[in-house]
Structure formats: structure tokens, C-alpha cells
Amino acid sequence: MNLDMTTLLVVSSLVITVTSVLFIVEARYREGDEVDRLWSLAFAAALTTGLSYLASAVVPELWWANAVGNIGSVLTTCAMWNGIRALQGRRSLVQVSAGAGALAGLAVVVAGPDGGAWAGGAVMLAGTALGALAGGVALLRSASARRIRAAVLLGTVLLAAGAFYAFRLVVFLTAGPQSLLFRTYAGTEVTTLFVVLLITGAAFSMVVLRGTQARARQDEARNFDPMTGARTGVSFVPRATALLRAHEEGNVPVALAAVTPEGIDEIAVAFGREHADRALVVCGEAVQVLLPKRALMGRDAMDGRAFQVLLPGWTAEEAAAWATEVRKEILESPLEVPGSRLRLAVSIGITTARTHGYDLDGLCDVSRKVSRGAIAEGGNRVVPAQADGDVSAPTATR
């Protein structure tokens, strides 16, 4: 059976329609935010693109449908890029994307009915490629996004799409759309199949990514993290702040320890995210087993892989001795991975109210900086902070 161009466009339009509608409906069911609205716009644009090119192919008199298709093609990848920016807490550049799409459509209008099927093609290919490449780079440059497989998949899909459209643009400009090279490797047939893979892969990645973030927001709204048992910021911050305020009135010593597990990203790459999560659980359980009375343990909101432990009434020396026991306990609690057992390590930064005041944010910042510095110097150690915020000599090493 041979598929002519019209049949191929019809089938691809149906696939894109079903995929786009499912994503848009799922986003509306989730009562989505700006990210969902932008990504829904991307799928609506993809749907419009397929239908517009189909209309111009079936009815040549509808030459202006190519303008709509060009606008939709550019908006598809640019809206995905803007959604990624919003996902990262950055301002979306919808006006820039709209301007690029309008330029691609205007090129067709300027060419008029005699412009042919590829009127404005260079502008459309450039805009589509840039939107996809910008989205892929923005996503894969984010360390937090790289820890989520769906985000990595989405970034890879966008980079592949951007590279393909950039290739089409180069061949379009150098050999022309009627050349054998373009028709064989960058023509409408190949592109139609590629776009179907792009839309379905992007939709799957986006649904999984948004679901993962929705669960993360639910966990953040709870008093305790369901995976590690540590307090979330919802309950840790107000209780720790109240304790510090009460101890400040009596000038009572308070210590804060930042427990930072090491090698979590490497474990995720080598054995999978589930084993990396299990490593966090092992570290969290060890801290809780040795948690002193009245101490508070929370999961660091700025680094979800670290823990903060507030030790009311403890001096720096006492906190360092306790942290050393925690470090040893974690070393003696191996992680089971396929075909092996890994010894886990942590670096623990210690700071006190006597040296850095009774402000929770200040204590957390200093101890976090100290623990990260200890990792940079070799890791697997307990390090108290000096009064000026620098680290002192380690009290425990490998």
C-alpha cells in the first residue's frame, strides 16, 4: 500500500489532534497554571498547523492557509520554550514568540497566491528551529530538571527537533525546496512523520513532568516528607524559628547541622532514580535514629537532597560529636544496588547561634555553605563553621 501526501497529512493530523486534545483536556482537569496554558497553546498551534497545511494541499486556492500553518509551526516550539521558562520561574517571552509567528505568516501574505507552497518557508523553518533549540537548551541546562527523566526526554526531543529544522533550513537555502536532497531528507513526508514523533514524545514528557511536579507540590504542603520522614518547610521553618526566638531570650546555645548526602546524582545515573531516592531514605533514617530529644529535622527547601537539623541547647563541639556519629552510622548502612552494595557518605556543616546569630535563614545559609565546601574538599567529613563563616579544620575524615 502506498500513502499519498494527502493521506499522510490526514493520518498525521488525526494523531496530532488526538494527542493535542488529550493534553489540553488533562491540563484543564489539573486547573493548570501559566506553564500548562503555554504548553496547551503549543499543542493547539500544532493542531492548527497540521489542519492548515492539509487544507492548502487539498484545495490549492486556499494558499493563505500556508500563512496560518507557518504561524502555528513557529508557535508550537516557541510556546514550548516559553512554557519551560515559566516552569523555571522565569518570565515567558510570549510577545517575542508571537512576533516570530506573525513574521512567518506575513512572508506568505507578501508572496501572495503565486508564492507557492514554500512561500515564507525560510522564516518558518528558522523560527521553528530556534524555538525548539532554545527550549531544549533551557531545560537541559537546569540541574533540577536533569534529575527528572521526563524533563531530560523533553529536552532531548526539543533539541532533536531543533537540529532537524535547522538542517531543513540549511538545505532549503542552499539547494532549494525542489532539490532531490531536500525532498529526500527534509521534505514534507519525512517532516510529517518527524512532527508526529515530536508531538507525541513531547506530550508524554510534559504530562509526566507536570504530574511529578504536582506530587512534589503536594509533598511540600505536608508537614512531613513522605519519603524520608523529615519535616517539610511548612512545619520545620515556623517551629525552628519559634525555638530560636525562645532560646535567644535566654541566650541559650543552639546549633544547626546541614547533612548533605554525596553522590546522589551519580547513583541516579548509574542505577536509576529509585536507587537515588533510596539513598536519601537511608541517610534520613540514620539521622532520625540518632536524633536527640527536642531536636528538629527538616528537608532543605533549597536542596531537596540535604537535611537540616536544629539542636537546641547544643554547643558546636557537642553538635560536631553527634554529627560524627551520624556520619559513621550512614557509612555502616550500605545501599543495595543491582549486583553490589554501596557505602554512602555525607558531609555535615555545623554552625551555632553563638557565632552566627539566632536567625534561621542565616544559620541555614552558613551550614549549607560549609557542608558544600566540605564536599568540594573531598567529602565524607564533619566541619564546624568559624565565626567569620569560613570552615575550620575537619573533625572527621575518611
Image (cartoon, rainbow, N blue to C red):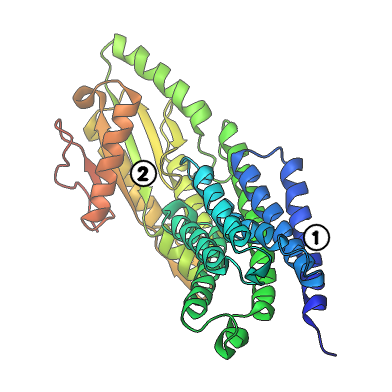
Q: Residue at x 44, y 48 (%)?
A: 305
Q: What is the quadrant of the C terminus in the image?
A: bottom left
Q: Residue at x 18, y 48 (%)?
A: 394
Res. 251 in view: yes
Amino acid type at circle 2 is: Val
In the depicted structure, whether residue 276 falls above or below residue 256 = below
Q: Residue at x 54, y 54 (%)?
A: 103
Horizontal and vertical percent position of residue 208: 65, 55
Question: Cβ–Cβ below 8 Å for labels 1 and 2?
Answer: no
* Along the line of sight, the residue nearer the viewer: 247 or 32: 32
Name the image quarter holding residue 359: top left
Horizontal and vertical percent position of residue 317: 22, 34
In the depicted structure, whether residue 315 falls above or below residue 215 = above
In the depicted structure, whether residue 57 falls above or below residue 27 = below
Horizontal and vertical percent position of residue 291: 43, 36
Horizontal and vertical percent position of residue 332: 40, 57
Give the residue at the far right of this rendering: 1
* Along the line of sight, the residue nearer the viewer: 169 or 202: 169
State the mark number for residue 18.
Answer: 1
Give the CA distance from mark 1 to mark 2. Answer: 47 Å
Name the image quarter holding residue 30: top right
Residue pointed to by mark 2: 259
Amino acid type at circle 1 is: Val
In the depicted structure, whether residue 85 falls above or below residue 235 = below
Instruction: Determine the secondary structure under disc 1.
Output: helix
Instruction: Determine the secondary structure under disc 2.
Output: strand
Mark nearer the N terminus (1 vs 2): 1
Task: Tell whether 46 sits left or right of 308.
Answer: right
